[in-house]
Image: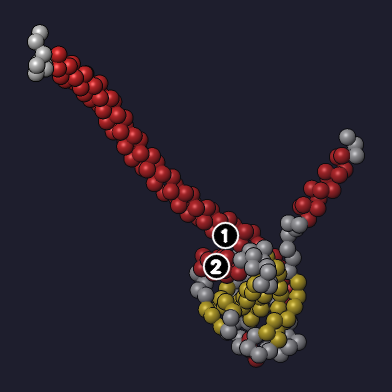
Amino acid sequence: MRKIIPAIILILSAHLSSFAQPVATGTRVEYQKGDKAAAVIELPYNPDVVQASIKENMLKKGIREEKSKGFQVFKGTRLTPTDGEVVDLYFKVDRKSRRDNGVSVVYLIIGRPNENVALRTGDDSFKVEEAKTYLNSITPNVDAYNLEVTILQQEAIIKKAEKHLNSLQDDQRDYEKKISNLNEKLVQTKRDIEIQTGDVAKQKAARDAMMTRRVVPGVIN
């Protein structure tokens, strides 16, 4: 028993580690033909889900999405509710690979208000550390959004399954009604057979009685 418990702990630890919280790091990403300093994080969600989550979260803050060369851009936003400085956020969400369609690579460049980020020099690392922190903070939002999407998908599956179930139940009722009608017809047919059998026997008896009264020519009784 003492040997089993440590083994279980190791298995659980390995299982939990596979779901470890992702952590953002520094990187570089191409923006309008130039590499820019950015933060990056991998999230275990489909790119469409991540992009929609970011858009919804920013919309709740009253910031509308703009598009720029494959980036989601949100201008004039605050990194935290108490932040007195506004910045522009440039998100790029890519699929990790063809095999990992359920994993997204999320890049974030933080721009100065109304800055033309395309003109930024390669060594400009404006707020990269803040970008890391921001990417780390969006994970719960994406997780919650993904859960809602999954719930809606499951509800759609249930709705389709219920529709099929209702169709099968309708078929069952139709079949049961047909079976009931056939049973009634079967019972009536059995009754008709009994009556008809008696009538056939009666007619045969009448015929036989008639045949006994036949007179054969040349035979004197």
Res. 52 mark: 2
Three-letter code for the amino acid on which mark 2 is drawn: Ala
**Total tally of numbered discs in the picture:** 2
Q: How is the image coloured?
A: secondary structure
Which residue appears at 50% of the width and 74% of the height?
A: 64
Q: CA distance from mark 1 to mark 2?
A: 8 Å
Residue that badge 1 annotates? 145
Which residue appears at 20% of the width and 22% of the height?
A: 200
| Location of residue 205 in the rendering, given as x and y in whole percent from the top left corner | 18, 16
Q: 179 and 130: which one is in front?
A: 179
Which residue appears at 64% of the width and 81% of the height?
A: 111
Residue 167 visible, this orientation: yes
Three-letter code for the amino acid on which mark 1 is drawn: Tyr
Picture quadrant of residue 207? top left
| Location of residue 187 in the rendering, given as x and y in whole percent from the top left corner | 28, 25
Q: 205 and 68: which one is in front?
A: 205
